[in-house]
Image (cartoon, helix red, strand yellow):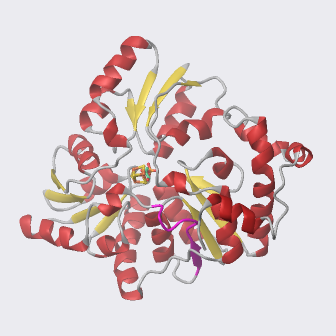
Amino acid sequence: MSLDIPVLRNELSQHYDLTPNPELAESMSDIYQSMSRVVSPVDWVLYAPYVKAINELKAKRNAVILGHNYMTPEIYHGISDFVGDSLQLAIKATEVEADVIVQCGVHFMAETSKILSPSKTVLIPDMEAGCSLAESITAEGVEEMRRRYPGAPVVTYVNTTAEVKAASDICCTSSNAAQIVGAMESDTVIMTPDQYLAQNVARDVPHKKVVWWEGSCIVHEQYSAQDLRDFREWNPGTRLIAHPECPPDVVAEADFSGSTSGILKYVTEEKPEKALLITECSMASNIADELPEVEFVGPCNMCPFMKKITLEKVLWSLHSMEGQVEVEPVMAAKARHAVQAMIDLSRKLGI
Ligand code: 13P
Ligand code: SF4
């Protein structure tokens, strides 16, 4: 079935009442309250029938929705059962008891859920929700790094395919990368595939020689240190908060750097008057309502892969059960070893 939005809307409206309905929207105002700063009342009238249909179908299918922090607010607040960063969602996938996981995020996240929960049905509402980092390396790339740095362990970012995880020793996310690298026994540590995350980790773990693959995130690589200096000059008093997928000179200009959950924690605790989140656009939108005292100022960059996930596609995946993620069992077992090693070490380190 085509995932063209008008085609999907037409097909779905044969099965669900998706007519914009102000009374329905009003009756769901408790959900709307969590996004009213960033979603207009008119848009909510359009979204509410989808949110209702998805939440009802979710219960019928014994499904849970895991939503990444970069999902749009109507997905993040309206239909997600659990939200978080990559590490939190990976851990949640091991804990939920549902039959079906719908991953509202990108493909590598759904694959990680499937690797950790092979007996569950894992759905990704759009198979083309990829990631520039995951596309930047194959298992052959990992082997090439091993040949270049014999004996060095491979720490692989979760933003990779199952094949790459399977070829690695341990995974990491942006919330535990420095601690995982710091805990490796070897003096030299290979990090794949994000060169900027690796360079940021290298600064934080100076006793290790960190070597890296040259991948990057198309969202975070767009920021420059000069952008941050200009912004600070034009908007004095704004707190600059950068994701560690940004280049190291950008992170050096920022007041704080952390994973998406690290960013949330920092802003919640610090409550700066004005904040610029140097990351994907939805991050600020999703936390705007719970932090009314903080003014979130732009600019931000959109991830075209994350934005492939829409309410229409989520409803369609739950309705049709299309978009099931499969990982070949032998490869899944090897990849699970690397992901589980990360989860276990994170727990041991208290992250
Ligand atoms: P975290 O949510 O783990 O910080 O990752 C950000 C990201 O780019 C996911 O694609
Ligand atoms: Fe990949 Fe960057 Fe998009 Fe995250 S934000 S999914 S790292 S391209």
Q: Can residue 141 be seen in this view?
A: yes
As rendered, which of 119 and 110 lies closer to the eye? 110
Q: Position of residue 133 (x, y in %)?
A: 33, 57
Magenta: main secondary structure: loop
Q: Looking at the image, which residue is at 21% across and 45% down? A: 202
User: Is residue 156 toward the left or the right of residue 279 in the image?
Assistant: left
Q: In this view, does 4 lie above or below 318?
A: above
Question: Quick check: is 152 in the magenta stretch?
Answer: no
As rendered, which of 173 and 6 lies closer to the eye? 6
As rendered, which of 204 and 286 lies closer to the eye? 286
Q: Can residue 80 be seen in this view?
A: no
Identify the image quadrant of residue 229: top left
The quadrant of the rendering that contains the N terminus is bottom right
Q: Looking at the image, which residue is at 85% across and 61% down? A: 17
Identify the image quadrant of residue 11: bottom right
Q: Position of residue 185 (x, y in %)?
A: 19, 62
User: Is residue 1 toward the left or the right of residue 218 in the image?
Assistant: right
Question: Quick check: is 125 in the magenta stretch?
Answer: yes
User: Is residue 315 toward the left or the right of residue 149 in the image?
Assistant: right
Q: Is residue 231 above or below residue 261?
A: above
Q: Is residue 60 above or below residue 310?
A: below
Stretch of the chain drawn in magenta: 120-129
Image mark count: 0
Q: Position of residue 215 (x, y in %)?
A: 25, 54
Q: Looking at the image, which residue is at 55% across and 36% down? A: 284
As rendered, which of 190 and 313 lies closer to the eye? 313
The extreme bottom residue here reads 330
Q: Position of residue 223 (x, y in %)?
A: 33, 34
